[in-house]
């Protein structure tokens, strides 16, 4: 009887250990297979590229890929069609071998790479690659982030190209994000389901009810700490709408929700919050707190004149309904161009 009891006690532990061995092996096999598939596709593309470049004729390239796809399909079955080979060739034009190896080491799949290959701008492509790696995006999330123009909404995109290159290289080397990558000029809060008219309290309640959606839009490293955080200065009570902690930045992040446009007095209020948090809430090993003022309307001139872009206070516009993509794209690209012109003029 004692042997039976001992057997029953040990079985769950044995089962758990064996499951860990099997799951670990399966993961390593899947990772190895993914790496080999990506490299195989890149090598196939490289070989076709060499042949096309040697003959120096674009029409020849199309015909050779068509003929090759037919022969490969006859030999290996589905999966080697014309479109697949075009993606292989494009990967060879866009990525160096070291870049492909780096991507697969960070667990990006061929489907990830196909999404990245659709991006013409090299810096933008590298931004999404690093964000996918650091935030562990699946392909669907990556496609969504590209579709809502995440890169164009970051402060990073407004910098001169040389500075963007430096910052992306630093992210790759240090495996950490910077505030210019984390914070954006606008946020899409359409998932909150707010009506046409709402109050700041309604917005706060909607964020808390849909916290997962809110964090998904803000970034995976945001961790919720408190709402209506009470702080007391000279016997006067103040309340911070939302308090988060960003694990990557190792900073407290105070969020203030505002209806309408940004006003200069909002900066003073947020500055008070940040100084209080820095003195009373900041723990050893943390960086100084950051503030994010979310406004329902945008007014970039106030932000520019107050030089908030370079401070610990970030200001952004939020949309409770998705804006027209064409108009938003024009607005973002215009803002990027103006910001870069201003930075070049100040050199």
Image: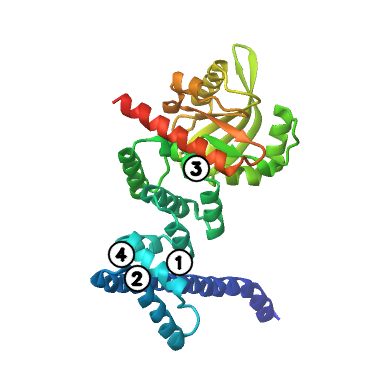
Between discs 2 and 4, the one toward the N terminus:
2
- Mark 1–mark 3 Cα distance, whole angstroms, equals 29 Å
Between tags 2 and 1, which lies in front? Answer: 2
Q: Which residue is mark 3?
A: 247
User: Which residue occupies the foreground of this view, 192 or 44?
Assistant: 44
Residue drawn at x 52%, y 24% as measured from the top left:
274
Asked if 174 appears above or below 187 in the picture, the reply is below
Q: Are marks 2 and 4 in contact (CB under 8 Å)?
A: no
Which is in the foreground here, disc 2 or disc 4?
2
Q: Residues within 10 Å of mark 2 (few under 14, many from 20)?
A: few
* Residues tagged 4 and 1 counted as in contact (Cβ below 8 A): no
| Helix, strand or loop status at disc 3 | loop
| Disc with the residue nearer the chain's start (1 vs 3) | 1
The CA span between labels 2 and 4 is 26 Å
Disc number placed over residue 59 in the picture, else none: 2
| Alpha carbons under labels 3 and 2: distance apart | 52 Å
Q: Earlier in the sequence, mark 4 or mark 1?
A: 4
Q: Is residue 8 left or right of residue 117?
A: right
In the picture as drawn, the residue positioned furthest to the top comes out as: 234
Q: Which residue is mark 1?
A: 110
Work out which residue is located at the far bottom of the displayed protein and give it: 75
Q: Give the image location of residue 202, x and y in percent.
A: 74, 32
Which quadrant holds residue 198? top right
The residue at 67%/37% (across/down) is: 320
Q: Quadrant of residue 91?
A: bottom left
Disc 1 is placed on an element classified as: helix
């Amino acid at each position: 009887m004692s042997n039976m009891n001992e057997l029953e006690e040990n079985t769950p532990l044995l089962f758990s250990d064996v499951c860990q061995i099997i799951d670990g092996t399966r993961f390593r096999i899947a990772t190895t297979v993914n790496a080999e598939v990506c490299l195989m596709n890149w090598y196939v593309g490289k070989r076709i590229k060499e042949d096309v470049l040697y003959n120096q004729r674009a029409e020849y390239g199309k015909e050779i890929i068509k003929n090759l796809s037919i022969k490969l399909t006859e030999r290996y079955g589905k999966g080697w069609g014309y479109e697949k080979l075009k993606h292989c060739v494009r990967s060879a034009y866009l990525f160096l071998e070291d870049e492909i190896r780096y991507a697969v080491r960070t667990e990006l799949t061929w489907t990830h790479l196909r999404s990245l290959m659709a991006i013409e701008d090299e810096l933008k492509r590298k931004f999404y690659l690093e964000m996918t790696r650091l935030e562990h995006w699946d392909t669907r999330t990556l496609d969504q982030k590209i579709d809502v123009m995440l890169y164009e909404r970051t402060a990073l995109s407004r910098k001169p190209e040389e500075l963007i290159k430096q910052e992306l290289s630093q992210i790759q080397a240090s495996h950490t994000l910077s505030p210019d990558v984390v914070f954006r000029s606008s946020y899409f809060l359409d998932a909150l389901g707010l009506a046409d008219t709402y109050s700041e309290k309604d917005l706060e309640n909607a964020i808390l009810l849909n916290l997962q959606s809110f964090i998904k839009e803000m970034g995976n490293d945001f961790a919720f700490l408190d709402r209506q955080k009470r702080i007391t200065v000279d016997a006067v009570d103040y309340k911070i709408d939302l308090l988060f902690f960003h694990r990557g930045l190792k900073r407290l992040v105070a969020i203030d929700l505002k209806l309408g446009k940004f006003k200069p007095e909002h900066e003073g209020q947020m500055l008070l919050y940040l100084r209080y948090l820095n003195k009373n809430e900041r723990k050893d090993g943390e960086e100084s707190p950051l503030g994010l003022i979310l406004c329902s309307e945008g007014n970039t001139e106030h932000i520019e004149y107050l030089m908030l872009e370079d401070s610990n206070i970030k200001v952004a516009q939020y949309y409770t309904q998705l804006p027209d993509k064409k108009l938003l794209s024009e607005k973002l690209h215009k803002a990027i161009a103006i910001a870069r012109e201003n930075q070049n003029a100040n050199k």
